[in-house]
Image (tube, rainbow, N blue to C red):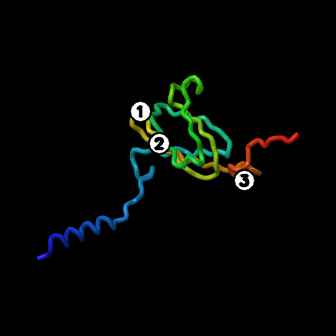
């Protein structure tokens, strides 16, 4: 007869060693993958999201996100517009949860503008007089 402790340890070891797939938009039926957003370093884009409840940005070193109130985003109700600004070259993602329970994922690709070296140079260099 097998020792119950040995059997339990063996089963737990097998469960821990199983390689589970990462949760992505393609493996999560409740998440919708939206087309990627392309920004240059220093570039801004207004993203309107109907029913926006909350959001999460993967890498805050590449993109700055500001939730805009109604008076600054035009006709969009408060909290339904995000201002995105590219601050460093690279790729990240933006997860959005909506009031109706839907989840969206947007890939954000930030590239250095031509002739620039990422976020170390100012967008408009100061003029020397």
Q: Residue furthest left?
A: 1
Q: Which of 63 and 19 lies nearest the eye of the viewer?
A: 63
Q: Is residue 83 left or right of residue 127?
A: left
Q: In which quarter of the image is residue 100?
A: top left
Earlier in the chain: of badge 2 and badge 1, it is 1
* Relative vertical location of residue 78 with respect to residue 114 in this rendering, above or below: above
Disc 2 crowd rating (10 Å Cα; few below 14, some 14-19, many 20+) is some
In 3D space, how far apart are the residues under numbered discs 2 and 1 (Cα atoms)? 12 Å
Label 1: which residue?
Answer: 99
Q: Quadrant of the C terminus?
A: top right
In 3D space, how far apart are the residues under numbered discs 3 and 1 (Cα atoms)? 40 Å
Earlier in the chain: of badge 3 and badge 1, it is 1
Please name which of the two marks, 2 or 3, marks the residue nearer to the observer: 3
Earlier in the chain: of badge 2 and badge 3, it is 2
> Which residue is at a point 11% across and 76% down the rendered structure image?
1
> Which residue is at a point 14% across and 75% down the rendered structure image?
2
The percent position of residue 15, horizontal first and vertical second, equals: 29, 65
Label 3: which residue?
Answer: 117
């Amino acid at each position: 007869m097998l020792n119950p402790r040995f059997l339990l340890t063996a089963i737990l070891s097998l469960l821990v060693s199983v390689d589970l797939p990462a949760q992505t938009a393609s493996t999560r039926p409740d998440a919708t993958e939206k087309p990627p957003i392309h920004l240059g370093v220093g570039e801004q884009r207004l993203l309107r999201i109907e029913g926006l409840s909350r959001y999460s940005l993967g890498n805050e070193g590449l993109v700055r996100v500001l939730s805009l109130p109604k008076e600054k985003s035009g006709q969009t109700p408060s909290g339904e517009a995000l201002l995105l600004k590219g601050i460093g070259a690279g790729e990240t993602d933006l997860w959005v949860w909506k009031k109706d329970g839907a989840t969206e994922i947007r890939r954000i690709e930030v590239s250095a503008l031509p002739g620039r070296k990422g976020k170390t140079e100012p967008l408009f260099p100061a003029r020397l007089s």
